[in-house]
Image (cartoon, rainbow, N blue to C red):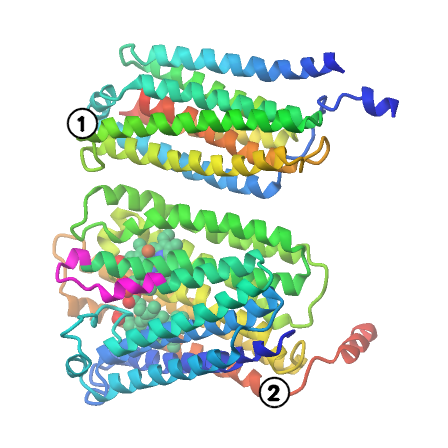
Amino acid sequence: MHNALTADPLQQSRGQPLPGDFAIWVFIFAELTVFGVLFAAYAFTRSAHVDLFNASQLTLNRAYGFANTLLLLTSSYFVARALRAIKTGRNKACGNWLAGALGLGALFLLLKLIEFHQDFARGITLSANLFYMFYLSLTFFHFMHVAMGMIILAVVAVKAYAGRYTADRHTGVETGGSYWHMVDLVWILLFALVYVIH
Amino acid sequence: MKNSYLHAIKPCTGAWLSLLALAAISFQLAYDKPGRILMLLVLVLTLLKGQLVVDHFMGLRHARPVWRVTMSVYLIAVGTLIGVAYLIR
Amino acid sequence: MKYQSQLVAKPYFIAALALFFGQIVFGLIAGMQFLDGTFLFSAAHFNIVRMTHTNLLIVWLLMAFMGAAYYIVPEEAQTELYSPKLALITFWVFLIAAALTVVGYLLVPYAHLAAITGNAIVPTMGRGYLEQPLPTKIGIVLVALSLLFNVTMTLIKGRKTSINLILVGALWGLALLFLPSFYFPEDTVKASYSWWWIVHGWVEGDWELILGALLGFILIKMTGVDREIVEKWLYIIMAMVLISGLVGIGHHYYYIGAPAYWIWLGSIFSAMEPIPFMLLIAFAFKMLFQRRREHPNKAAMLWAMGTPIMAFLGAGLWGFMITLAPAQYYIHGTNFTAAHGHLAFFGAYAMVSMAIISYAMPMLRGREANSVRAQHWEIAGFWIMVLSMIGIALALTGAGLVTAYLQRSGADPLGFMQVQDRARVFFWGREIAGAGFFTGLLVYLRSFFIQGEYQYTAQVKRALAT
Ligand code: HEM
Ligand code: HEM
Ligand SMILES: [Fe+2]
């Protein structure tokens, strides 16, 4: 008993299996492959149309991209905190962190929708040019992933509030969290590629 | 108890703050004149950010090294492909 | 077999195999007509023979899927089928409609058939795989509705497992995706769109989910692995199918008058389409290695393990080779496509149908597994058919490359018929491999006529003796 209390539940050693269900990692690796191919396609296409890409890239509103980066990074941080919370058995805190992450995710979607709206108003379409084709399809594809990740997180949050996880049984939190971090990771690459690097 | 709890939070919070800072730098660099150095710099910063997410948010620094290495290899591979594509022009 | 009503699957499976036999006969005739243009000239034109070949393919696969649904849904839902009688009536309606349609193809000139079946009112005839006259198409919709009503009601009153949800959901998708067949505008681009929604939407979307559900069911039953694990894999595979396949439809929009961005979207996303097939292989082998029991039906296990591998070869690998826009530029519509079509249709859908038939038929005939002798015949049939199909695919690939080189590239391309002559050796190869396939089919069908069941005690004794 004494030991159980003093042993730090957060102190982990190396050599653990992947956090969460292994199946989600199969999916994560598959998804990362898909995005990797998309990024490479963008980069190599650009190398054949550098001026077009540079010029079109300048028309994007980088502030939106930056704000969205901050939102996703922070929501990812919240999810990490949610995991910490459940590891110490604090269900409600876990749910709260997840709810916060969901809120930030929703803001991300909202901002992206506003950006899309402005793009369309400016006549940016899939057919406008190659850069916009990539920009729209990459960000929309990622947009769908954020939506999907939010659905997963919402399920996890509901379960957390319902007390379905405990300090030592919380694979679901890790599973949903891992997927969300992947969505974050992909956005980091996407932001750099589409908004920043020129 | 309380103490160890805080202790464990730190790296995560630290990672988050670093990520925000790195994002801000990248954002700032976005306004610079195009150039190879700049491109490589942003690329490296981006991969660094990726690795931070992998290590601290995904928590792979606690996982078997093979998984962390797999992720690093992924990041480096994507980074290299992008880098090469930008250098060949 | 746990529920009496599962028995309605039996006529579906038997009819499926009979139609399969017919399909192959017409395939051989069509292949022969490549070698001798006058073969059966007055009796059956190539276009009719080809159409019968492909339509029989679709119908027997639908028969097999329906049989599978009537078998699996009650067992998974742990309740009798809502209405076995309706299922049986539906079977006869479907079979008779299919038979009448084929008879119509063979006896009435196609244009005439179109005229007498009201094609002028709602034009639907003429597009590949969808050549059926209007009454048949309406019949297909009614049959599908009856099936959906039956299995959905069963699902509602019973246990809702993931396999059942995926299977029934995918059957709804199958029916809904058929509806564009009633939309055949004069604008050829729009007509192509709606045609591919069906063809691509089926084979590279919806049917992959059916394939996953059938394979998942078979593997749960045969390996005794936890349902939970199987379900998780199925959901992941499903997600990857949709992620790659939805936008992947662009690989049919390259040079047909669709917006140019499809060249990019189609190439990139369809290049991902092999991923779900790889995952299927990983999934099947994971189940095999984690199995908790040795099922006596070795033949069914062989079909179940062979399916994802052959599907990956035909759909994943052969599909990938032709999917990028620059490749399509040279290869579109050549025999390379036919090679891919044969290997993929056989490897994925024909084989998964035979897998569920192999697993369920012995049960429907009142035994867990067939006698060892019957299984030997079935396994021999498996190998002969699989190897022959690879032969067919390789021959067609050769013929396709001949076209790409001689007719579509170079400064002085040859005309179509000259190129066909140059590719003759490959058409011979296809027909010879086709004869092999036919032999394999006969061997396979023979296994159904060997009576007797698997003798546990005899097998154990023999195993101990050696
Ligand atoms: C089991 C799954 C699949 C089946 C049954 C299948 C079957 C077919 C068939 C029959 C055709 C010819 C359609 C026609 O009559 O014009 C076709 C075309 C095509 N398939 Fe698949 N396919 C499958 C999966 C895939 C995959 C995964 C890919 C890509 C990686 C792919 C790429 C293509 C392409 C690019 C064409 C167009 C070829 C052309 O127009 O010449 N297929 N497929
Ligand atoms: C004895 C074996 C077979 C022979 C000799 C054969 C022969 C043929 C021939 C000659 C065609 C017409 C090709 C053309 O129009 O250029 C064809 C088309 C087709 N066959 Fe077969 N076939 C055989 C088995 C199968 C099997 C087992 C399947 C599927 C399970 C199948 C699926 C198809 C499909 C999907 C098409 C349309 C392909 C396209 O348009 O690209 N065939 N077959
Ligand atoms: Fe397709």
Mark 1, chain letter? A
Side of C34 relative to C246 (left or right) = left
| Mark in front: 1 vs 2 | 1
**Label 2: which secondary element:** loop
Label 2: few (<14), some (14–19) or many (≥20) C-alpha neighbours in 10 Å: some
User: Residue A152: x, y in percent?
Assistant: 52, 38
Can you identify the residue that label 1 sits on?
A: A122
Side of C6 relative to A138 (left or right) = right
**Label 1: which secondary element:** loop
User: Residue C368: x, y in percent?
Assistant: 67, 76
Does residue C171 sit above or below B75 in this rendering? below
Magenta residues span C176-190
Relative to the observer, which residue lies in front, A30 or C391? A30
Q: Quadrant of ligand 2?
A: bottom left
Q: In the rendered structure, does residue C409 fall within the stretch colored magenta?
A: no
Is residue C335 at all visible to an observer of this figure? Answer: no
Relative to the observer, which residue lies in front, C53 or A23? A23
Does residue B47 sit above or below C418 in this rendering? above
Residue positioned most to the right:
A1
Image mark for residue C450: 2
